[in-house]
Amino acid sequence: MLVLTGRPKTYDMNRLPNIWFHEVTVNPPIMSSKIDAGQTVIEVEFTQFGRKGGAFVHKEFTRRLSDLSTAFHKRFSERFPVDLSVFSERQVNLSKVAVSNLLGGLGYFYGSSLVQSSHSGPEPVNNWPAGLFTATPSRSMFPRGFLWDEGFHGLILARWDPELAMETVGHWLDLMNVNGWIPREQILGSESRSRVPEKFVIQRDSIANPPTLALVVEALIDLLPKFSSAEVARFRQWSLTALPRLHTWYQWFNRTQAGSVPFSYYWKGRDPHEIHQLNPLTLSSGLDDYPRASHPSNTERHLDLRCWMALFARTVARLASLVAQYAQTETGQGHLQKLEEARLLAADYSGWADLLMDMNNLDQLHWSDAAGRYGDYGLHTDTVRLQMPAQSALEEGAEEPKATRVVDKPPIPQLITTSPGYLTLFPLLLRIIPPNSPRLGRLLDDLASEDIWTEHGLRSLSRSSPFYRKSNTKEDLPYWRGAIWINMNYLAVKSLRYYATHSRTPTDVASRANQLAVRLSQNLVRTVLGELERTGYMWEQYDDNTGRGQRGHPFAGWTALVALIISPDAS
């Protein structure tokens, strides 16, 4: 990683810059086996800060590189232990490639987001200039920060180096505005904007994104017993600044994404006037084209957001309890106030978590006895199709007409249960449903059904859905309508391991969850690492029929979660 210390106002001989750039432009020689006289040769020398002696080349460079390589393999075996009776040495080595590529995608970005807000008028304005240290989904295709991706990236960072995870989460929380909103896509500065389609550049302050940073905080808390003393000290310091920001962020969600019924939520930003999409997109959810209510309205209830809010509350409650414990051991001015504030937050968020994890309320809002599954609620019909307008001669320069959605049967308010998949499994994926719930076995039935389960991983959308593998427009090919995504499959493996080992899970259900966890993890590892070996890439998603990688590549973002799937400590 290259780091600049900044431009000093005065030159200090005792504080030298740690990098020097010099650009040389030459005409490249014709490739041959020897260097002819007169050809330009550029020799690069490396130096190490604080190192005495000659240039960092030849044997010295090789020795240092070997030391660092040995240290990497040692750290990996400590942080990602693998049962070699289940997974092969070759698979372990490929998972090292996955983690290495995620780490290589860490970057520092600086600039302003283009923001549209009701507080600043109808025209978008530049946000304040800010820096962001973050991992990226793909260095070549998506070289910037994505809020919902970063929570999954942070799970790997938390295992590899907890301080890295704290640093990246801290940077994201520092991008929060005074109301508690964080832009979901960080397109900082003109260079970043040049890489993004214009329609996606503007960030709107009414639009949310899954609060996946809570997953990282939860992982850090779970890993605390394994932290070194230095890591514990760093976490203690970090938690004091993270807690109030997480509190503010949660309250923003509660104010802006609340539904019309108490304890319900819905993703803002769906367009009720959209006539060219088979099912209006829900980009804010991260699941984009996953089928939801066919006719968006403010009466919708979104199951996934309700589950995210439950997990968020549960995590903030745990963090606040830890901060209260830390405050008890402090002395000095203000420590009693810190203690009282942390205790109040812990009590408040424990209460919120209890309310949002209350099964009677969740069932009342989202469970269908007829279908035997959870789902969204809204104004919906499955009988929709895209139809091209009648053909007529186009005038020169005129745009080609777009297909328009035709509704063959009027929508009615209902629970939407005809499109099972990732969405309908959310109470299981985020471990909202209690281990002893009678609903758990039914969710396992859905997960294991041949319409969702494949030998390559879990489909995003069941084959039984009327939207399975259907394009949303002529240009908008199916995205979350069948393909296998590793981030959601990771959550499934983690949850199955949780229910398999929980003392309150009935024995038969625990046994089944364990069998599914083992089979699913093996299928995913074989798919992701097999494609990495075959193609040289990790992929954005995988075909549900063939297991072949597809769409974005190289994609060393959340696909690198295969390293946590292969490790027993992932649960």
Image: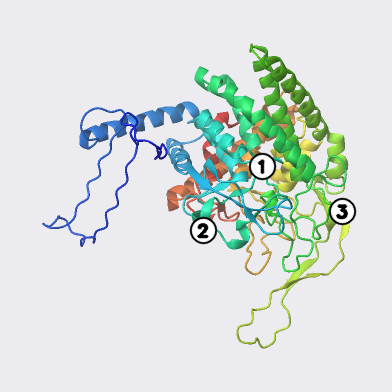
**Residue holding disc 2:** 195
Q: Position of residue 413 (x, y in %)?
A: 88, 55
Q: Is residue 82 among the parts visible in the rendering?
A: no
Q: Nearer the viewer, residue 237 or 86?
A: 237
Compared with residue 364, is residue 162 higher up or lower down, i.e. above or below? above
Residue occupying the point 53% across, 52% down: 189
Q: Are marks 2 and 1 in contact (CB under 8 Å)?
A: no
- Residue 383 located left or right of residue 394: right
Name the image quarter holding the C terminus. Answer: top right
**Residue holding disc 3:** 414
Q: Which element carries disc 1, helix, strand or loop?
A: loop
**Residue holding disc 1:** 177
Mark 2 vs mark 1, CA separation in Å: 25 Å
Using a 10 Å C-alpha cutoff, classify the residue at mark 1 as few (fewer than 14 neighbours), some (14 to 19) or many (20 or more): some
Q: Earlier in the sequence, mark 3 or mark 1?
A: 1
Q: How is the image coloured?
A: rainbow
Using a 10 Å C-alpha cutoff, classify the residue at mark 2 as few (fewer than 14 neighbours), some (14 to 19) or many (20 or more): some
Amino acid type, label 3: Gln
Name the image quarter holding the N terminus. Answer: top left
Q: Nearer the viewer, residue 163 or 382?
A: 163
Compared with residue 332, is residue 558 higher up or lower down, i.e. above or below? below
Q: Position of residue 365 (x, y in %)?
A: 86, 43
The residue at the far left in this view is: 37
